[in-house]
Amino acid sequence: MRAFIGNFDFEHQLARPGSTLSSQLRRLNAELATSWLAIADDGDILWTPESIEQEFWEQCASVGLPRLQTVTQFADIPADAELVPWGWTSALSHLAQQRAQIVIDPQIIRRANSRRWSMDLEQSWNVGLEGSQTITDLSAVETAVAQFPGLLTKWVIKAEFGMSGRERLLGYGPLTAALRPWFTKRQRADGVVFFEPWVQRIAEAGILFDIVDTGVQFVGVAEMLPTSQGQYAGSIFHQTDSAHDWSPAIEIATQAAERLHQQGYRGPLGIDAMWYRDDSGAVRCRPLQDVNARWTMGRLALGWRRHFTSIRFGYWWLGSRTAWERGDHLSAARSRGYLDAQCQVLRTSPSMICGGPTHHVAAVVAIS
Protein backbone atom coordinates (compact mmCIF):
# COMPACT_ATOMS: atom_id res chain seq x y z
CA MET A 1 0.00 0.00 0.00
CA ARG A 2 1.41 3.36 -1.06
CA ALA A 3 0.59 6.86 0.16
CA PHE A 4 1.02 9.43 -2.60
CA ILE A 5 1.97 12.97 -1.55
CA GLY A 6 1.73 15.63 -4.23
CA ASN A 7 4.20 18.25 -3.03
CA PHE A 8 4.36 19.86 -6.44
CA ASP A 9 6.14 22.84 -4.87
CA PHE A 10 9.22 20.59 -4.51
CA GLU A 11 11.68 22.85 -6.37
CA HIS A 12 10.41 25.85 -4.42
CA GLN A 13 11.31 24.05 -1.20
CA LEU A 14 14.74 23.14 -2.58
CA ALA A 15 15.43 26.76 -3.46
CA ARG A 16 14.05 28.20 -0.20
CA PRO A 17 13.88 25.48 2.48
CA GLY A 18 11.36 26.13 5.22
CA SER A 19 9.78 29.12 3.49
CA THR A 20 6.02 29.67 3.67
CA LEU A 21 4.16 28.66 0.55
CA SER A 22 2.24 31.30 -1.35
CA SER A 23 -1.50 30.85 -1.72
CA GLN A 24 -0.90 30.10 -5.40
CA LEU A 25 1.44 27.19 -4.64
CA ARG A 26 -0.85 25.84 -1.92
CA ARG A 27 -3.70 25.82 -4.38
CA LEU A 28 -1.52 24.17 -7.03
CA ASN A 29 -0.73 21.32 -4.63
CA ALA A 30 -4.43 20.89 -3.90
CA GLU A 31 -5.58 20.97 -7.52
CA LEU A 32 -2.94 18.62 -8.91
CA ALA A 33 -3.25 16.05 -6.11
CA THR A 34 -5.45 13.80 -8.25
CA SER A 35 -2.70 13.51 -10.90
CA TRP A 36 -1.54 10.38 -9.06
CA LEU A 37 -4.57 8.53 -10.45
CA ALA A 38 -2.39 7.72 -13.46
CA ILE A 39 -0.24 5.25 -11.53
CA ALA A 40 -2.15 4.50 -8.32
CA ASP A 41 -3.84 1.18 -7.65
CA ASP A 42 -7.02 0.25 -5.80
CA GLY A 43 -6.56 0.74 -2.08
CA ASP A 44 -3.65 3.17 -2.32
CA ILE A 45 -3.80 6.34 -0.24
CA LEU A 46 -3.85 9.86 -1.63
CA TRP A 47 -3.04 12.96 0.39
CA THR A 48 -5.31 15.79 -0.71
CA PRO A 49 -4.56 19.14 1.00
CA GLU A 50 -8.22 20.04 0.48
CA SER A 51 -11.23 17.74 0.64
CA ILE A 52 -12.61 16.64 -2.73
CA GLU A 53 -16.27 15.86 -3.23
CA GLN A 54 -17.22 12.17 -3.27
CA GLU A 55 -18.95 12.60 -6.63
CA PHE A 56 -15.57 13.09 -8.30
CA TRP A 57 -14.24 9.79 -6.96
CA GLU A 58 -17.40 7.96 -8.02
CA GLN A 59 -17.00 9.34 -11.54
CA CYS A 60 -13.39 8.16 -11.63
CA ALA A 61 -14.35 4.64 -10.50
CA SER A 62 -17.12 4.50 -13.11
CA VAL A 63 -14.57 4.82 -15.94
CA GLY A 64 -12.19 2.25 -14.49
CA LEU A 65 -9.83 4.45 -12.49
CA PRO A 66 -8.60 3.14 -9.12
CA ARG A 67 -10.59 3.52 -5.91
CA LEU A 68 -8.35 5.39 -3.51
CA GLN A 69 -8.43 6.19 0.17
CA THR A 70 -8.00 9.92 0.78
CA VAL A 71 -6.60 11.80 3.77
CA THR A 72 -6.03 15.50 4.38
CA GLN A 73 -3.67 15.11 7.35
CA PHE A 74 -0.34 13.27 7.35
CA ALA A 75 -1.19 11.85 10.78
CA ASP A 76 -4.03 9.88 9.18
CA ILE A 77 -1.71 7.95 6.84
CA PRO A 78 -1.45 4.36 8.14
CA ALA A 79 1.89 3.48 9.70
CA ASP A 80 2.48 0.61 7.26
CA ALA A 81 1.94 2.72 4.12
CA GLU A 82 4.97 3.52 1.96
CA LEU A 83 5.28 7.30 1.50
CA VAL A 84 5.64 8.28 -2.17
CA PRO A 85 6.17 12.04 -2.50
CA TRP A 86 6.53 13.98 -5.74
CA GLY A 87 10.00 14.87 -4.47
CA TRP A 88 11.88 14.20 -1.24
CA THR A 89 12.27 17.37 0.81
CA SER A 90 14.08 17.44 4.16
CA ALA A 91 10.74 17.65 6.00
CA LEU A 92 9.28 14.62 4.20
CA SER A 93 12.51 12.68 4.67
CA HIS A 94 12.29 13.32 8.42
CA LEU A 95 8.65 12.17 8.43
CA ALA A 96 9.56 8.96 6.59
CA GLN A 97 12.43 8.23 8.99
CA GLN A 98 10.02 8.56 11.91
CA ARG A 99 7.99 5.82 10.24
CA ALA A 100 11.11 3.62 9.86
CA GLN A 101 11.14 4.08 6.08
CA ILE A 102 14.57 4.17 4.44
CA VAL A 103 15.17 7.46 2.62
CA ILE A 104 17.97 9.09 0.63
CA ASP A 105 20.17 11.80 2.11
CA PRO A 106 18.42 15.14 1.33
CA GLN A 107 21.76 16.60 0.20
CA ILE A 108 21.99 13.95 -2.53
CA ILE A 109 18.47 14.88 -3.63
CA ARG A 110 19.35 18.58 -3.68
CA ARG A 111 22.53 18.07 -5.70
CA ALA A 112 20.84 15.76 -8.21
CA ASN A 113 18.11 18.35 -8.93
CA SER A 114 20.43 21.34 -9.22
CA ARG A 115 21.24 22.88 -12.58
CA ARG A 116 24.81 23.20 -11.32
CA TRP A 117 25.09 19.38 -11.44
CA SER A 118 23.54 18.98 -14.90
CA MET A 119 25.44 21.96 -16.38
CA ASP A 120 28.75 20.56 -15.11
CA LEU A 121 27.91 17.25 -16.77
CA GLU A 122 26.90 18.94 -20.04
CA GLN A 123 30.15 20.86 -20.19
CA SER A 124 32.40 17.94 -19.23
CA TRP A 125 30.72 15.66 -21.80
CA ASN A 126 30.39 18.45 -24.41
CA VAL A 127 26.67 17.86 -24.97
CA GLY A 128 25.28 21.30 -24.03
CA LEU A 129 24.28 24.33 -26.05
CA GLU A 130 27.05 26.40 -27.57
CA GLY A 131 27.33 29.62 -25.57
CA SER A 132 25.69 28.29 -22.41
CA GLN A 133 27.58 28.98 -19.19
CA THR A 134 27.46 29.19 -15.42
CA ILE A 135 27.21 32.79 -14.18
CA THR A 136 28.30 34.02 -10.76
CA ASP A 137 28.29 37.83 -11.11
CA LEU A 138 26.53 40.58 -13.05
CA SER A 139 29.49 41.44 -15.27
CA ALA A 140 29.55 37.84 -16.50
CA VAL A 141 25.87 38.10 -17.41
CA GLU A 142 26.53 41.25 -19.42
CA THR A 143 29.44 39.56 -21.19
CA ALA A 144 27.29 36.54 -22.00
CA VAL A 145 24.35 38.49 -23.42
CA ALA A 146 26.76 40.65 -25.46
CA GLN A 147 27.18 37.59 -27.69
CA PHE A 148 23.57 38.10 -28.75
CA PRO A 149 23.22 41.85 -29.49
CA GLY A 150 20.38 41.64 -31.99
CA LEU A 151 16.86 42.49 -30.90
CA LEU A 152 15.62 39.29 -32.52
CA THR A 153 18.14 37.03 -30.79
CA LYS A 154 16.69 35.52 -27.67
CA TRP A 155 18.40 34.18 -24.55
CA VAL A 156 17.33 32.71 -21.22
CA ILE A 157 18.82 32.89 -17.71
CA LYS A 158 17.72 30.16 -15.31
CA ALA A 159 17.93 29.85 -11.53
CA GLU A 160 19.58 26.82 -9.94
CA PHE A 161 16.19 25.32 -9.07
CA GLY A 162 13.02 25.74 -11.08
CA MET A 163 10.36 23.88 -13.02
CA SER A 164 7.92 24.29 -15.90
CA GLY A 165 9.39 27.57 -17.09
CA ARG A 166 9.44 29.19 -13.64
CA GLU A 167 12.43 30.96 -12.08
CA ARG A 168 13.94 32.21 -15.31
CA LEU A 169 14.45 35.36 -17.38
CA LEU A 170 13.81 35.61 -21.11
CA GLY A 171 15.39 38.50 -22.96
CA TYR A 172 16.70 40.00 -26.19
CA GLY A 173 19.95 41.87 -26.56
CA PRO A 174 21.56 43.61 -23.55
CA LEU A 175 20.39 42.99 -19.99
CA THR A 176 18.01 45.82 -19.10
CA ALA A 177 17.70 47.58 -15.75
CA ALA A 178 14.24 46.04 -15.26
CA LEU A 179 15.71 42.52 -15.37
CA ARG A 180 18.65 43.09 -13.03
CA PRO A 181 16.74 42.80 -9.71
CA TRP A 182 15.72 39.23 -10.56
CA PHE A 183 19.33 38.28 -11.25
CA THR A 184 20.52 39.96 -8.06
CA LYS A 185 17.92 38.11 -5.98
CA ARG A 186 18.78 34.70 -7.44
CA GLN A 187 22.53 35.30 -7.28
CA ARG A 188 22.31 36.23 -3.61
CA ALA A 189 20.19 33.16 -2.84
CA ASP A 190 22.18 30.52 -4.74
CA GLY A 191 25.42 32.21 -5.76
CA VAL A 192 24.88 31.20 -9.36
CA VAL A 193 22.56 31.38 -12.39
CA PHE A 194 22.77 29.70 -15.78
CA PHE A 195 22.83 31.41 -19.17
CA GLU A 196 21.63 29.73 -22.37
CA PRO A 197 20.90 30.88 -25.91
CA TRP A 198 17.29 30.35 -26.97
CA VAL A 199 17.23 27.82 -29.80
CA GLN A 200 14.67 26.70 -32.35
CA ARG A 201 12.97 23.75 -30.69
CA ILE A 202 11.90 20.81 -32.85
CA ALA A 203 10.78 18.36 -30.15
CA GLU A 204 11.23 17.78 -26.42
CA ALA A 205 10.80 14.68 -24.32
CA GLY A 206 11.30 13.28 -20.85
CA ILE A 207 13.64 10.27 -20.72
CA LEU A 208 12.37 8.32 -17.72
CA PHE A 209 14.15 5.94 -15.35
CA ASP A 210 13.88 4.22 -12.01
CA ILE A 211 17.12 4.07 -10.04
CA VAL A 212 17.15 1.14 -7.62
CA ASP A 213 19.85 -0.52 -5.54
CA THR A 214 20.80 -2.90 -8.34
CA GLY A 215 21.15 -0.17 -10.98
CA VAL A 216 19.31 1.92 -13.55
CA GLN A 217 16.01 0.77 -15.09
CA PHE A 218 14.78 2.50 -18.26
CA VAL A 219 11.03 3.22 -18.08
CA GLY A 220 10.26 4.99 -21.36
CA VAL A 221 10.00 8.27 -23.24
CA ALA A 222 7.22 10.84 -22.91
CA GLU A 223 7.27 13.59 -25.52
CA MET A 224 6.29 17.04 -24.28
CA LEU A 225 3.65 19.52 -25.33
CA PRO A 226 5.31 22.89 -24.58
CA THR A 227 3.81 26.34 -24.95
CA SER A 228 5.39 28.90 -27.30
CA GLN A 229 7.36 30.18 -24.30
CA GLY A 230 8.72 26.73 -23.52
CA GLN A 231 6.50 26.07 -20.51
CA TYR A 232 5.12 22.60 -19.90
CA ALA A 233 1.57 21.99 -21.13
CA GLY A 234 1.42 18.21 -21.25
CA SER A 235 3.06 14.94 -22.31
CA ILE A 236 2.35 12.52 -25.15
CA PHE A 237 2.18 8.77 -24.61
CA HIS A 238 2.50 6.46 -27.60
CA GLN A 239 1.33 2.88 -27.76
CA THR A 240 3.95 2.36 -30.48
CA ASP A 241 7.14 4.21 -31.42
CA SER A 242 7.10 8.00 -31.56
CA ALA A 243 7.78 10.12 -34.63
CA HIS A 244 11.22 11.11 -33.28
CA ASP A 245 14.30 9.01 -32.63
CA TRP A 246 15.34 9.60 -29.03
CA SER A 247 18.05 6.94 -28.94
CA PRO A 248 20.96 9.47 -28.86
CA ALA A 249 19.37 11.19 -25.87
CA ILE A 250 18.58 7.88 -24.15
CA GLU A 251 22.23 6.82 -24.42
CA ILE A 252 23.58 9.99 -22.75
CA ALA A 253 20.72 10.18 -20.23
CA THR A 254 21.42 6.60 -19.19
CA GLN A 255 25.04 7.51 -18.47
CA ALA A 256 23.85 10.44 -16.33
CA ALA A 257 21.44 8.14 -14.49
CA GLU A 258 24.29 5.70 -13.82
CA ARG A 259 26.35 8.60 -12.43
CA LEU A 260 23.51 9.43 -10.02
CA HIS A 261 23.26 5.78 -9.00
CA GLN A 262 26.97 5.79 -8.15
CA GLN A 263 26.48 8.97 -6.10
CA GLY A 264 23.76 7.36 -4.01
CA TYR A 265 20.47 8.55 -5.54
CA ARG A 266 17.56 6.10 -5.53
CA GLY A 267 14.10 6.78 -6.92
CA PRO A 268 12.32 8.07 -10.05
CA LEU A 269 14.32 10.16 -12.50
CA GLY A 270 13.25 12.24 -15.48
CA ILE A 271 15.83 13.79 -17.82
CA ASP A 272 14.49 16.29 -20.33
CA ALA A 273 16.00 16.18 -23.81
CA MET A 274 15.49 18.30 -26.92
CA TRP A 275 15.97 18.12 -30.66
CA TYR A 276 16.68 21.62 -31.97
CA ARG A 277 17.98 23.52 -34.99
CA ASP A 278 21.12 25.62 -34.56
CA ASP A 279 22.01 28.89 -36.32
CA SER A 280 23.44 27.03 -39.31
CA GLY A 281 20.22 25.05 -39.73
CA ALA A 282 21.72 21.78 -38.54
CA VAL A 283 19.53 19.53 -36.37
CA ARG A 284 21.13 18.70 -33.03
CA CYS A 285 20.24 16.89 -29.81
CA ARG A 286 20.57 18.27 -26.29
CA PRO A 287 20.27 15.15 -24.11
CA LEU A 288 20.61 16.76 -20.65
CA GLN A 289 18.42 19.83 -20.84
CA ASP A 290 17.07 19.34 -17.30
CA VAL A 291 17.56 16.64 -14.69
CA ASN A 292 14.65 15.95 -12.32
CA ALA A 293 15.39 13.52 -9.51
CA ARG A 294 11.72 13.16 -8.63
CA TRP A 295 8.46 12.10 -10.23
CA THR A 296 7.49 14.01 -13.37
CA MET A 297 4.31 14.64 -15.31
CA GLY A 298 5.84 12.72 -18.19
CA ARG A 299 6.18 9.70 -15.91
CA LEU A 300 2.53 10.01 -14.89
CA ALA A 301 1.55 10.37 -18.54
CA LEU A 302 3.01 6.95 -19.31
CA GLY A 303 0.83 5.57 -16.54
CA TRP A 304 -2.28 6.40 -18.55
CA ARG A 305 -1.39 3.89 -21.27
CA ARG A 306 -2.80 1.05 -19.17
CA HIS A 307 -6.29 2.60 -19.42
CA PHE A 308 -6.41 2.75 -23.23
CA THR A 309 -5.95 0.22 -26.01
CA SER A 310 -5.93 0.47 -29.81
CA ILE A 311 -5.24 4.20 -29.96
CA ARG A 312 -2.87 6.20 -32.18
CA PHE A 313 -1.56 8.11 -29.22
CA GLY A 314 -2.75 9.98 -26.20
CA TYR A 315 -1.66 12.93 -24.17
CA TRP A 316 -1.82 14.20 -20.63
CA TRP A 317 -2.85 17.86 -20.69
CA LEU A 318 -2.43 20.48 -17.96
CA GLY A 319 -3.74 24.00 -18.22
CA SER A 320 -5.85 26.75 -16.79
CA ARG A 321 -9.61 26.53 -16.48
CA THR A 322 -9.90 29.27 -19.10
CA ALA A 323 -7.77 27.28 -21.54
CA TRP A 324 -9.91 24.21 -20.89
CA GLU A 325 -13.12 26.10 -21.60
CA ARG A 326 -11.84 27.40 -24.93
CA GLY A 327 -10.80 23.89 -25.99
CA ASP A 328 -7.02 24.10 -25.77
CA HIS A 329 -6.88 20.49 -24.55
CA LEU A 330 -7.64 19.40 -28.11
CA SER A 331 -4.86 21.50 -29.67
CA ALA A 332 -2.40 18.60 -29.81
CA ALA A 333 -4.82 16.56 -31.92
CA ARG A 334 -5.37 19.48 -34.29
CA SER A 335 -1.67 20.24 -34.63
CA ARG A 336 -0.97 16.62 -35.60
CA GLY A 337 -3.58 16.53 -38.32
CA TYR A 338 -6.23 14.57 -36.41
CA LEU A 339 -9.00 17.11 -36.86
CA ASP A 340 -11.51 14.39 -37.68
CA ALA A 341 -10.15 11.73 -35.37
CA GLN A 342 -12.22 10.33 -32.54
CA CYS A 343 -11.00 11.83 -29.28
CA GLN A 344 -11.81 10.30 -25.92
CA VAL A 345 -11.39 13.00 -23.27
CA LEU A 346 -11.08 12.00 -19.63
CA ARG A 347 -10.95 14.86 -17.18
CA THR A 348 -8.92 13.83 -14.14
CA SER A 349 -9.28 16.83 -11.85
CA PRO A 350 -12.29 17.91 -9.76
CA SER A 351 -14.35 20.85 -10.95
CA MET A 352 -14.42 22.51 -7.52
CA ILE A 353 -11.72 22.73 -4.86
CA CYS A 354 -10.51 25.16 -2.20
CA GLY A 355 -14.00 26.57 -1.98
CA GLY A 356 -14.23 27.58 -5.62
CA PRO A 357 -13.77 26.54 -9.26
CA THR A 358 -10.59 24.62 -10.04
CA HIS A 359 -7.98 26.91 -11.60
CA HIS A 360 -5.83 24.13 -13.07
CA VAL A 361 -7.47 21.40 -15.09
CA ALA A 362 -5.83 18.06 -15.88
CA ALA A 363 -7.18 15.77 -18.61
CA VAL A 364 -6.26 12.77 -20.70
CA VAL A 365 -7.04 12.79 -24.42
CA ALA A 366 -6.82 9.44 -26.27
CA ILE A 367 -6.93 9.62 -30.07
CA SER A 368 -8.04 6.63 -32.12
Image: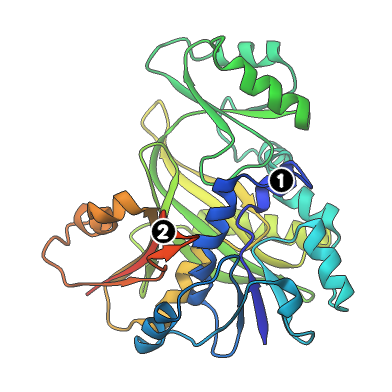
Q: Which color scheme did the rendering employ for the protein?
A: rainbow
- Residue 130 percent across, percent down from the top left: 56, 28
Q: Which residue is mark 2?
A: 358
- Residue 9 percent across, percent down from the top left: 63, 52
The answer to whether any part of residue 289 appears in the image is no
Q: Which residue is mark 1?
A: 20
- Residue 244 percent across, percent down from the top left: 37, 57
Within 10 Å of disc 2 (Cα), the crowding (few <14, some 14-19, many 20+) is many
Q: Residue at 40% of width from left, 85% of height from top? A: 58
The amino acid pointed to by label 1 is Thr
Q: Nearer the viewer, residue 292 or 260?
A: 292
The amino acid pointed to by label 2 is Thr
Which element is circle 2 on? loop
Assign the N terminus to one quadrant of the image.
Answer: bottom right
* Distance Cα–Cα, label 2 vs label 1: 22 Å
Q: Is residue 273 above or below residue 77?
A: above
| 147 left or right, relative to 137 | left
